[in-house]
Image (spheres, rainbow, N blue to C red):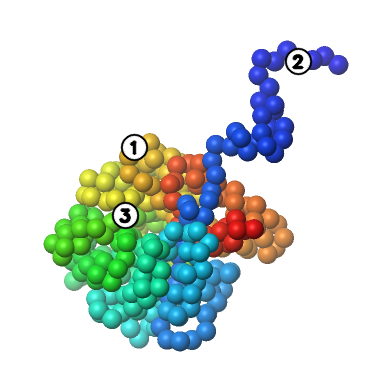
Amino acid sequence: MRRLNLPRRPRRLRRTVAIRNMVAETAVTPADLIQPFFVIDGEGAPQDIASLPGQQRLSIRDLVAACEELYRLGVPGVALFPSLESALKDPTGTEALNPQTLVLRAIRAVKKAVPELSIITDIALDPYTSHGHDGIFNPAGTDIDNDGTVEILRKMSVLCAEAGVDFVAPSDMMDGRVEAIRESLDDAGLTETAIMAYSAKFASAYYGPFRDAVGSASAAGTTLLGKHTYQLNPANRREALLETELDELEGADVLMVKPAGPYLDIIREVRANTHLPLAAYQVSGEYAQLHAAARLGWLDLERCRDESLLAIKRAGADMILTYFAKDVALQAKG
Ligand code: PBG
């Protein structure tokens, strides 16, 4: 047999586990992850969510226990999403500004029990509106009213900050909301509350299971609710970069790309274009599809889970919002 005369044999560095670990360029640890949680009112038992296997809607009491466990496992943050009964929803999302609304009570309870755990809450109206949109309609009912929605988001942000969140996370994609929210927080003396901006948030079909979980789908009568007049067109890369630049100029502390897996190119480019920390949201549909394939015996859940997170980190995300956070942390503990 003839020996190839090769100056480089890359396989030398893949020969053993020890060598492979020495040359590994990327690792995902529990400290990189943020766990989203869904919260419901009352003292009831956890409710399963059919399209999000392993995730449940939790009462505040169960949420606090889950947050304590997560913090012990080394996960530094949670994103809280309220799931409200439809009687509390109306076209203008009035309940969002109720000073005793569910998410504010949940924030206070979690902060009291686990003060070091970072809490992030969405600033958007979809859990509160009867139509499931992230904002209010204009008087003609033809589109979501940008500036009128931002007025409400300012107040929501101040309420969440006063309740103790570390980050408010505008996820609505209205123009100018980051600057407006920063101004309102500062005016209220809440200068230390940070803004994690859902900057490049695409109008994605991967949000379906989340809409089941918070009931914005049933409110709208469809999981395919079109948010194309405010969320980004999945076809557009330059426009995504423009959105992240604007949010940075408006005062965002952390930028976000969402969904994550189908948008690795965007994560990569945003990473190269800013010095701010970058978050990526591995959304409900990305989680659900791995579970569905695993259930059919077609994919190995744990290995695909780890590979999907590694890819998001490798693309340039500093932190990842993922429904897998607790599972990964449990496995890391051994
Ligand atoms: C609401 C919001 C959505 C998600 C996070 N915040 C859904 C939407 O915009 O309709 C999706 C998260 C997921 O799918 O896991 N503004």
Q: On the rendered structure, is 124 left or right of 154?
A: right
Of residues 154 and 158, which is closer to you in this image? Answer: 158
Q: Which numbered marker is on residue 289?
A: none
Answer above or below: position of 147 versus 39.
above
Q: Residue at x 38, y 83 (%)?
A: 86
Q: Residue at x 29, y 56 (%)?
A: 195
Q: Residue at x 25, y 79 (%)?
A: 98
Residue 62, x across and y down, in percent: 48, 78
Do the CB atoms of the residues marked 2 and 3 lie less than 8 Å apart? no
Q: On the rendered structure, is 156 left or right of 109?
A: left
Do the CB atoms of the residues marked 3 and 1 lie less than 8 Å apart? no
Instruction: Name the secondary structure under disc 1.
Output: helix
Amino acid identity at mark 2: Leu
Of residues 91 and 199, which is closer to you in this image? Answer: 199
Of residues 164 and 266, which is closer to you in this image? Answer: 164
* Residue farthest right in this picture: 1
Q: Which residue is mark 2?
A: 4
Q: Which residue is mark 1?
A: 273
Instruction: Name the secondary structure under disc 3.
Output: strand
Residue 312, x across and y down, in percent: 50, 47
Q: Earlier in the sequence, mark 2 or mark 3?
A: 2
Q: Which residue is mark 3?
A: 197
Residue 121, x across and y down, in percent: 35, 65
Amino acid identity at mark 1: Asn
